[in-house]
């Protein structure tokens, strides 16, 4: 059967010196279905971010194939890869990466520059609860609010895939819960595929699928038949 | 240890520091170089004057007797007096050229500088010819010349080739700009060996004076010694040759300050931005240094040392190369105008203080940058600085703001938030544009001289200067020719509100060869009553149409008064112009000194004339001078390009580094390369356009300023052709586009993964 996302024998090797290299991702295989809420867990340095970056088309594999909707993105050239990022992927980072000189609304609206269509900017901002703050600059917003801008920015173009690298890493736990639950809704209500990299094992209870990574290898893939809503998880 | 940290920091901010280096270097190079040119010319000429004992004053008159000389010598304040006869002659076999003969009695004042051959001495027979003329006409020491003086032929052997301090700048004719050594020379002879040839007594017409008195007191002395004689006193500093050269020196000195300003300004501003960025990046390091126990003083000194170090190294390099290379280049150009035995560069020692000041300013920029960071206790500094607060500018409240595309909004905000950076970029572009435009403008204006003076105003082909010996029968015969236009050109003294100014009076007979124009370029006729005065004199002395002007011919005549009826503009020659009709109305008679025609020079190889000059030769000389000027223009343009490239590249890199995180984010979000490039280049293009817009009037103003120092006889309108505007504007734009293209290649090197890894 065809999976929405499929990693086949993916390797990522970093060259450190002349004869020295480091295998950050080592023969990884896994698959993710459309609409799943996936959590990638693992200790620091395990290779979680690397996997996510490969999946998001921000980095290139050393070996292997990554299939998205049946298409091998490792074969894309720079332009196609950029297009893929623009159309299909929404990124949410630990440090928000908002443009400081644009207001919340403008930060969201700017993705419209690259893809036509998508959702209405103001509606999206309202859906993440930022209607009143939309004309403020990032520095005038709290961390949680900034992360919500970044979520709004990611979903505004209506992507199939939301990739979140430690989205709550820089937030207090209460705010983190609000953000995570928002992301879960994106999947449960919005029908998007959401993949979250996290340190927090407790999040596993809320996920449809948990992928555990260690030393660049997939240790286990757990499928959760009855994921809990984020708000009910015991943090 | 901190020195090593500095070297490493310099290395990691190479582009910025290299540009500070280049700017300081260029600034100091031009500054000290031009100073060496100006000071050197000043020094070289005054050495020459000293060596040759140039007279402090000259008295023009006629038939000066030995008693008068003795009498004058007795006067207090007069150290020495000497007689001299100056008259024009020509070579028997070369009527095209004119030689000014100086027949010297005792040779104690205004000596010759010997280039070749024997020294001039009053008891030696022979002729001493100026070396430039000899060179152009292939005359050598030992040759025998046959000289035609007022109809008589004498033969003299060339004993030596010389240079004379009164002929540093000497023209045959007021209509020339550049000396033509092929057709104009001068020679010195001893009076003792002259009277024999001559056949009658010498009538000395000049007195050379050595005195330490000022003009007023010499004038008084002169009037007591010569109560009944028409004499004219000319002080050394008013002598045409001396004055023209002094003008040139001040022009060089003016350039010394104007040009380096842009470079030094950029150097200091760049130091400021670079150091501000460096210190805010090293905030934590400053905190650590402080907590480890470094005194504020030490830390401040450390950050000042960047600017001081670079400033010192580059200034020293500029200080040692500028005064060597620039004089070499400029003197080559000056030698076309002026004749001096020695051209040496020389530096005003005070310049070094200014150089030190420049270094200090670079240091102070570093101080200013880190001083802000040092405020507060160590623990506070160790915490990262809060990011710059976002602020809505007034602009955004306007209705059209929201209709702008985000890249425009983004760039506008970015510009407003990095005002210093934006200002430096604009200043750099203004400097670049101004320099290029001024360089081209100089050329255009020079081109204009040729056009105006020789195509529009003076339309004759040949000017024949009559000599005193032109027989009256010949004159009558010449006057029959209706085609010839006769003119009288005489030196005059003008009395303007009791100030005596020496100038030239031209009485213009009937004819078509002189066409005057007014200030605005419209043709004007000389009035039938009253006179015309050139614009430069009018402006200098605040004379208007309707004012009265009083003048008298040099050496003779009483004062004449006339009313200014028109003001005309002449680019190369200033004075009074009167039509023959108006002259007659003043009860005066035009005594022709020359006539104009469009017949070829060869028609007049007759010995009756003092000289025959072709306009073509003058124009050709101008063109030769323009070629030398092209080198200067090329260097100006090169300096401008360096300024532009360094500023744009340096600030482009700075802006790129500051925005790299944002650019990476956009790249991750799926912005295509060309879109990012456009985003990055947009503000540089804007700033370039602003710089160009301001630089256009800037270039015009700089040109106007430069022309001010061109000397009293010039009246040049700054003129820049459309072509020059086009080339400078397109050139500057192109420069910006090329630099931006290089900058945007950096976009390809962005590594999305590592750039977004953490907050800095
Ligand atoms: N550019 C690089 N060059 C060399 N090695 C790298 C590079 N980027 C990452 N690595 C290595 O690859 C490994 C995986 O890195 P990665 O960022 O994926 O870890 P992670 O699982 O996201 O860790 P964390 O939870 O701390 O973010 C690490 O050991 C890291 O040292
Ligand atoms: Mg990570």
Image (tube, rainbow, N blue to C red):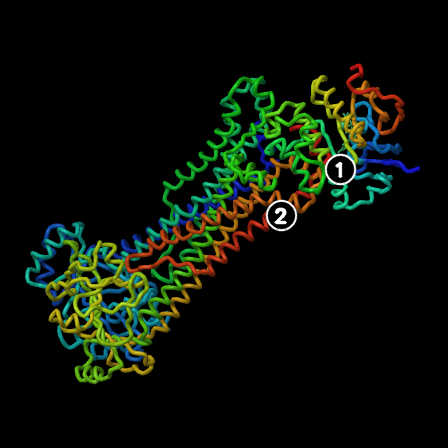
Q: Quadrant of residue B755?
A: top right
Q: Quadrant of residue A189?
A: top right
Up/down of B90 relative to B442, above or below: below
Q: Is residue B569 left or right of residue A226?
A: left
- Dividing the image into four equal quarters, which quarter contains ligand 1? top right
- Specify the label residue B363 is tagged with: none
Q: Is residue B403 left or right of residue A231?
A: left
Q: Secondary structure at mark 2?
A: helix
Would you say residue B319 is visible in this rendering?
no
Q: For the residues tagged 2 and 1, is the chain the same? A: no
Figure quadrant of the N terminus of chain A:
top right
Kindly give the residue lying farthest to the right in the view shown: A1
The local crowd at label 2, few if under 14, some if 14 to 19, many if 20 or more residues have their Cα within 10 Å, is few
CA separation in Å, label 2 and label 1: 24 Å
Would you say residue B564 is visible in this rendering?
yes
Up/down of B667 relative to B477, above or below: above
Q: Residue at x 71, y 41 (%)?
A: A117
Identify residue for label 2: B742
The local crowd at label 1, few if under 14, some if 14 to 19, many if 20 or more residues have their Cα within 10 Å, is some
Q: Quadrant of residue B498?
A: bottom left
């Amino acid at each position: 059967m065809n999976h929405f996302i499929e990693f086949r024998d993916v390797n990522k090797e970093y060259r450190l010196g002349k004869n020295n290299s480091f295998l950050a991702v080592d023969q990884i295989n896994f698959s993710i279905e459309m609409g799943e809420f996936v959590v990638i867990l693992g200790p620091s340095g395990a290779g979680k971010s690397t996997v996510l970056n490969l999946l998001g088309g921000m980095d290139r594999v050393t070996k292997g194939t990554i299939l998205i909707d049946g298409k091998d993105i490792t074969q894309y050239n720079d332009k196609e890869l950029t297009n893929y990022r623009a159309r299909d992927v929404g990124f949410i980072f630990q440090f928000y990466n908002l443009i400081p000189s644009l207001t919340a609304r403008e930060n969201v609206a700017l993705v419209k520059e690259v893809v036509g269509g998508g959702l209405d900017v103001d509606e999206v901002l309202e859906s993440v609860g930022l209607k009143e703050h939309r004309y403020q600059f990032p520095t005038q917003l709290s961390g949680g609010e900034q992360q919500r801008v970044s979520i709004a920015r990611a979903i505004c173009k209506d992507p199939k895939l939301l990739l979140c690298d430690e989205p709550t890493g820089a937030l207090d736990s209460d705010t983190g819960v609000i953000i995570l639950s928002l992301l879960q809704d994106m999947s449960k209500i919005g029908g998007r595929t959401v993949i979250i990299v996290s340190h927090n094992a407790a999040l596993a209870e809320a996920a449809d699928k948990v992928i555990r990574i260690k030393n660049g290898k997939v240790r286990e893939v757990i499928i959760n038949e009855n994921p809990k809503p984020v708000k009910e998880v015991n943090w | 240890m901190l020195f090593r940290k500095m070297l490493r920091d310099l290395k990691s901010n190479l582009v910025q520091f290299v540009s500070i280096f280049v700017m300081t270097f260029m600034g100091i190079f031009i500054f000290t170089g031009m100073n060496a040119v100006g000071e050197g010319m000043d020094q070289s000429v005054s050495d020459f004057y000293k060596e040759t004992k140039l007279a402090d004053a000259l008295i023009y008159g006629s038939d000066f007797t030995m008693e008068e000389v003795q009498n004058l010598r007795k006067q207090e304040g007069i150290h020495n007096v000497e007689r001299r006869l100056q008259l024009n002659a020509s070579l028997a076999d070369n009527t095209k050229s004119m030689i000014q003969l100086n027949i010297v009695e005792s040779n104690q004042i205004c000596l010759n500088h010997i280039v070749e051959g024997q020294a001039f001495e009053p008891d030696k027979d022979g002729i001493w010819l100026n070396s430039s003329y000899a060179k152009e006409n292939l005359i050598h020491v030992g040759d025998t010349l046959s000289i035609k003086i007022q109809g008589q032929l004498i033969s003299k052997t060339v004993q030596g080739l010389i240079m004379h301090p009164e002929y540093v700048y000497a023209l045959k004719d007021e209509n020339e700009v550049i000396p033509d050594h092929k057709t104009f020379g001068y020679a010195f002879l001893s009076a003792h060996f002259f009277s024999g040839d001559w056949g009658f007594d010498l009538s000395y017409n000049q007195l050379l004076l050595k005195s330490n008195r000022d003009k007023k007191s010499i004038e008084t002395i002169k009037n007591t010694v010569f109560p009944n004689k028409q004499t004219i006193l000319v002080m050394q500093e008013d002598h045409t040759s001396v004055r023209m050269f002094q003008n040139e020196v001040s022009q060089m000195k003016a350039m010394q300050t104007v040009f380096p300003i842009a470079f030094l300004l950029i150097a200091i501003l760049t130091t400021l931005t670079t150091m501000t960025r460096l210190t805010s990046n090293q905030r934590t390091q400053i905190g650590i240094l402080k907590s480890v126990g470094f005194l504020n003083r030490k830390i401040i000194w450390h950050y000042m040392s960047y600017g001081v170090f670079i400033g010192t190294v580059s200034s020293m390099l500029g200080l040692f190369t500028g005064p060597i290379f620039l004089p070499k280049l400029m003197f080559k150009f000056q030698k076309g105008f002026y004749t001096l035995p020695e051209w040496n560069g020389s530096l005003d020692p005070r310049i070094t203080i200014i150089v030190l000041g420049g270094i200090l300013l670079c240091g102070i920029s570093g101080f200013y940058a880190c001083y802000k960071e040092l405020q507060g206790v160590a623990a506070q500094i160790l915490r990262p600085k809060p990011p710059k607060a976002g602020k809505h500018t007034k602009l955004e409240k306007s209705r059209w703001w929201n209709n702008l595309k985000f890249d425009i909004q983004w760039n506008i905000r970015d510009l407003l938030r990095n005002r210093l950076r934006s200002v430096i970029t604009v200043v750099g572009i203004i400097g670049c544009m101004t320099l290029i435009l001024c360089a081209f403008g100089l050329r255009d204006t020079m081109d204009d001289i040729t056009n105006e003076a020789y195509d529009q105003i003076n339309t004759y082909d040949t000017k024949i200067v009559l000599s005193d010996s032109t027989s009256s029968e010949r004159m009558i015969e010449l006057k029959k020719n209706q085609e010839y236009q006769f003119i009288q050109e005489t030196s005059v003294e003008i009395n303007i509100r009791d100030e005596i100014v020496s100038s030239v009076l031209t009485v213009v007979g009937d004819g078509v060869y002189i066409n005057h124009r007014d200030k605005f370029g419209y043709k004007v006729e000389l009035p039938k009553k009253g006179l015309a005065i050139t614009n430069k004199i009018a402006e200098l002395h605040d004379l208007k149409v309707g004012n009265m002007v009083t003048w008298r011919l040099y050496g003779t005549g009483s004062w004449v008064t006339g009313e200014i009826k028109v003001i005309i503009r002449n680019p190369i020659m200033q004075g009074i112009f009167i039509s023959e009709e108006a002259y007659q109305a003043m009860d005066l008679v035009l005594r022709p000194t020359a006539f104009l025609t469009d017949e070829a020079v060869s028609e007049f190889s007759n010995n009756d004339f003092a000289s025959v000059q072709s306009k073509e030769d003058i124009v050709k000389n101008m063109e030769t001078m323009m070629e030398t000027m092209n080198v200067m223009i090329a260097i100006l343009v090169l300096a401008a390009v360096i300024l532009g490239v360094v500023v744009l590249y340096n600030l482009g890199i700075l802006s790129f580094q500051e925005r790299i995180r944002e650019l990476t984010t956009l790249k991750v979000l799926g912005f295509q390369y060309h879109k990012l490039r456009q985003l990055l280049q947009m503000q540089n293009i804007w700033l370039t356009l602003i710089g160009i817009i301001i630089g256009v009037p800037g270039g015009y103003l700089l040109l106007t300023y430069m022309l001010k120092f061109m000397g009293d006889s010039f009246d040049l309108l700054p003129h820049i052709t459309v072509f020059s505007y086009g080339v400078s504007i397109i050139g500057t734009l192109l420069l910006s586009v090329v630099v931006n293209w290089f900058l945007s290649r950096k976009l390809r090197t962005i590594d999305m993964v590592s750039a977004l890894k953490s907050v800095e």
